[in-house]
């Protein structure tokens, strides 16, 4: 390979991961740092499964503990995005233990951040919030505005799940403000997505679509496939709530294509759930049920409790409408019980 790791890092800093992938596609060497940068490029493109395989190769050849920690953290982030919270937590914990043993404070904080995000994905919201607050204090002291934006975004998501919508909006607004200070457009786009999502739950649907459009403008000029898919799916949800079913359907189809491209089964589950709701509104119950069974299958291999519960509730409603009362009631009661056990309010969000 003729290109240096420094050049590869510069390309990643310039948000050109596809160039890195192109340069390293046929790389069969054993340089741990090169492999790590290859994995980072795939992750930035939203190709999480390929990234994980490359990180695992990189870990075998990591020559320094710093690099080993960075690989573990990247693995944790990738596993979390794919809905595998337990695997994400274990990778982050291993990074934390190694960082603490070497007294690498910064790496230890990053590891705690990933542990918190895994706990958040798993539904341990209070524990996650405590960890995130600790990380936020560190970023605030360092005046790391990008880091602060990310943590505030994560906290906004927790408040949303807890049904504390005023606090959720405040966190997302602060996340956006810090992203602007950092001149971090990607973080700003995700802050807008956070505001869009909580606006939708609060039935402020026009604001929802507005914020997703603001995020869409940013993602349009990036190679962030996940961000583009996320925005399409979210906007589809908003358009669906506005009763613009045909427009929503087109957005779901685009999200389906993009999530399929990167192998994100969890978010494909949310796309199928949304498509089913459009079909239900159009009176196509049997077609809706097909989408819901597909959503259930996608969620089954993940730790995404909210998606699992939303799907079960929608299946119950559809079966009830089809005259299968006993099955519907049984499924619905089990879904509500699961939501209460997890401390989620999903069963109250059926209007969305």
Image (tube, rainbow, N blue to C red):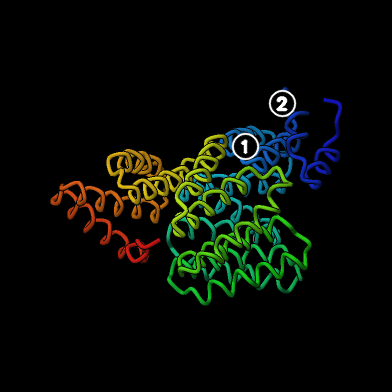
Query: Is 288 located above or below residue 27 in the figure?
Result: below
Residue to which mark 2 is pinned? 25
Quarter of the figure with residue 235: bottom right
The image shows residue 329, relative to residue 260, as above or below, that is below
Judged from this view, the residue extending furthest toward the bottom is 166
Looking at marks 1 and 2 on the same chain, the residue that comes earlier in the sequence is marked by: 2
Question: Going 56% across and 50% down the picture, which residue do you hit?
Answer: 230
Q: As drawn, is 273 to the left or to the right of 173? A: left
Q: Is residue 285 above or below residue 337?
A: above
SS of the residue under disc 2? loop
241 left or right, relative to 15: left
Q: Whole-percent x and y of residue 348?
A: 34, 66
* Residue 280, numbered circle: none
* Residue at image coords 51%, 55%: 118
Badge 2: how crowded within 10 Å, few (<14), some, or many (20+)? few
Q: Examine the image and state in which quarter residue 132 appears.
A: bottom right
Left or right position of 349 against 212:
left
Quadrant containing the C terminus is: bottom left
Q: Which residue does the numbered mark 1 point to in the structure image?
A: 51
Q: What is the x, y in percent for residue 141?
A: 73, 74
């Amino acid at each position: 390979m003729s290109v240096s790791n420094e050049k590869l890092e510069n390309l990643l800093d310039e948000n050109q991961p596809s160039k890195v992938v192109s340069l390293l596609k046929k790389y069969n060497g054993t340089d741990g740092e090169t492999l790590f940068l290859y994995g980072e490029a795939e992750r930035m493109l939203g190709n999480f499964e390929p990234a994980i395989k490359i990180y695992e190769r990189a870990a075998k050849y990591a020559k320094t503990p710093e690099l080993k920690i960075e690989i573990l953290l990247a693995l944790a982030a990738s596993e979390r995005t794919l809905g595998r919270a337990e695997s994400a937590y274990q990778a982050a914990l291993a990074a934390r233990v190694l960082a603490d043993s070497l007294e690498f404070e910064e790496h230890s904080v990053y590891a705690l951040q990933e542990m918190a995000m895994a706990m958040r994905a798993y539904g341990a919201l209070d524990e996650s919030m405590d960890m995130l607050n600790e990380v936020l204090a560190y970023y605030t002291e360092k005046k790391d505005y990008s880091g602060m934006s990310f943590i505030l975004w994560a906290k906004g998501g927790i408040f949303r799940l807890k049904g504390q919508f005023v606090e959720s909006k405040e966190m997302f607004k602060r996340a956006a403000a810090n992203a602007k200070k950092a001149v971090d457009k990607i973080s700003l786009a995700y802050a807008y997505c956070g505001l869009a999502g909580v606006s939708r739950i609060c039935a402020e649907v026009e604001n929802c679509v507005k914020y997703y459009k603001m995020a869409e403008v940013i993602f349009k000029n990036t190679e962030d496939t996940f961000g583009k898919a996320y925005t399409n799916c979210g906007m589809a949800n908003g358009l669906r709530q506005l009763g613009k079913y045909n427009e929503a359907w087109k957005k779901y189809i685009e999200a389906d294509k993009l999530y399929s491209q990167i192998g994100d089964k969890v978010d494909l589950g949310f796309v199928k759930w949304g498509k089913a709701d459009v079909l239900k509104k159009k009176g196509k119950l049997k077609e809706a049920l097909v989408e819901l069974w597909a959503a259930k299958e996608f969620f089954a291999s993940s730790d995404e409790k909210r998606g699992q519960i939303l799907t079960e509730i929608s299946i119950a409603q559809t079966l009830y409408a089809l005259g299968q009362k006993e099955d519907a009631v049984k499924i619905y009661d089990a879904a509500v019980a699961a939501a209460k056990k997890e401390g989620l309010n999903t069963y109250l969000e059926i209007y969305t």
